[in-house]
């Protein structure tokens, strides 16, 4: 046993450091659904900066130091207790915001968000300080409107960019600050699930907005 450890300790130390790195500093996350289309599509693998919001003890959710709070427009990864799984959504409402939606049009603190129609149901949504793509297929869907709500302290209102097909805060409620894992700003690679998992080279190292 001692001989085995001596011969392989460099490898085991490397594995330990790699797992610590992935647990507390940076990782990647698969995108299994279309809830963030057209920004993210099924088969994308996104980078996750786990130090965007907190410095944590590896392999735990214990925060040693808060680096920053999630900002409106961030694409954030969080472990949702309400959904029972890890989710990727966009931050729309931060603590203290009052958010409403009428026929898929957002109102933030009483101000209507501007939209620019594109093609095939895609639009540019001009959040304060952040412009990004979103998809609306049915303005009359059951998800298209909700009354004004105020985001409580240490919570966030999250929405998917594919507004008609996203189980987000309209389903799971506000997301606690403690559930956030990190922020994503890029696609590492992408595999086409419908075409024999062939790589989509045009999405490799793609920046996210």
Image: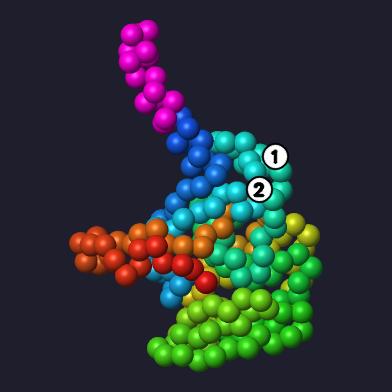
Q: Secondary structure at mark 2?
A: strand
Side (left or right) of 28 relative to 132: left
Q: Which residue is mark 2?
A: 54
Q: Are marks 1 and 2 in contact (CB under 8 Å)?
A: yes
Q: Does the magenta-highlighted stretch encompass residue 125?
A: no
Q: Residues within 10 Å of mark 2 (few under 14, many from 20)?
A: many
Query: Is residue 2 shown in magenta?
Result: yes
- In the image, taking residue 59 as reference, residue 119 lies left or right, namely left
Between residues 140 and 61, which one lies in front from this camera angle?
A: 61
The residue drawn where x is 46% and y is 85% is 122
Q: Secondary structure at mark 1?
A: strand
Residue 4 position (above or below residue 133): above
Number of residues whose C-alpha sits closer than 10 Å to that of mark 1, classed few (under 14), some (14–19) or many (20 or more): few
Q: Which residues are magenta?
A: 1-15
Tell me which corner region of the image, top left, top right, bottom left or bottom right, holds residue 191.
bottom left
Q: Which residue is mark 1?
A: 64
Q: Position of residue 27 (x, y in %)?
A: 47, 48
Mark 1 → mark 2, Cα distance in angstroms: 7 Å
**177 relative to 145, above or below:** above
Of the two numbered discs 1 and 2 on the same chain, state the one appearing first in sequence: 2
Answer with the quarter of the image where residue 76 lies.
Answer: bottom right
Q: Nearer the viewer, residue 43 or 48?
A: 48
Q: Residue at x 77, y 84 (%)?
A: 110
Tell me if residue 157 can be seen: no
Q: How many labels were placed on the picture?
A: 2
Mark number displayed over residue 192: none
Q: Position of residue 99 (x, y in %)?
A: 71, 76
**What residue is rendered at 62% in x and 76% in y?**
130
The image position of residue 173, as x and y in percent, is 65, 64
């Amino acid at each position: 046993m001692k001989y085995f450890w001596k011969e392989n300790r460099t490898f085991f130390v490397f594995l330990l450091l790699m797992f610590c790195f992935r647990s507390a500093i940076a990782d990647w996350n698969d995108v299994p659904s279309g809830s963030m289309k057209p920004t993210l599509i099924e088969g994308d693998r996104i980078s996750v900066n786990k130090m965007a919001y907190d410095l944590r003890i590896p392999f735990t959710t214990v925060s040693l130091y808060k680096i920053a709070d999630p900002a409106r427009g961030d694409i954030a990864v969080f472990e949702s207790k309400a959904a029972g799984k890890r989710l990727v959504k966009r931050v729309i409402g931060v603590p203290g915001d009052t958010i409403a939606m009428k026929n898929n049009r957002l109102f933030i603190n009483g101000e209507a968000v501007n939209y620019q129609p594109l093609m095939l149901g895609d639009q540019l949504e001009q959040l304060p300080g952040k412009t990004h793509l979103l998809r609306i297929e049915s303005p009359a869907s059951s998800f298209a409107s909700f009354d004004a709500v105020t985001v409580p302290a240490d919570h966030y209102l999250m929405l998917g960019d594919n507004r008609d097909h996203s189980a987000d805060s309209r389903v799971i409620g506000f997301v606690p600050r403690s559930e956030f894992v990190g922020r994503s700003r890029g696609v590492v690679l992408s595999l086409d699930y419908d075409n024999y998992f062939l790589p989509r080279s045009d999405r490799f190292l793609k920046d996210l907005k």
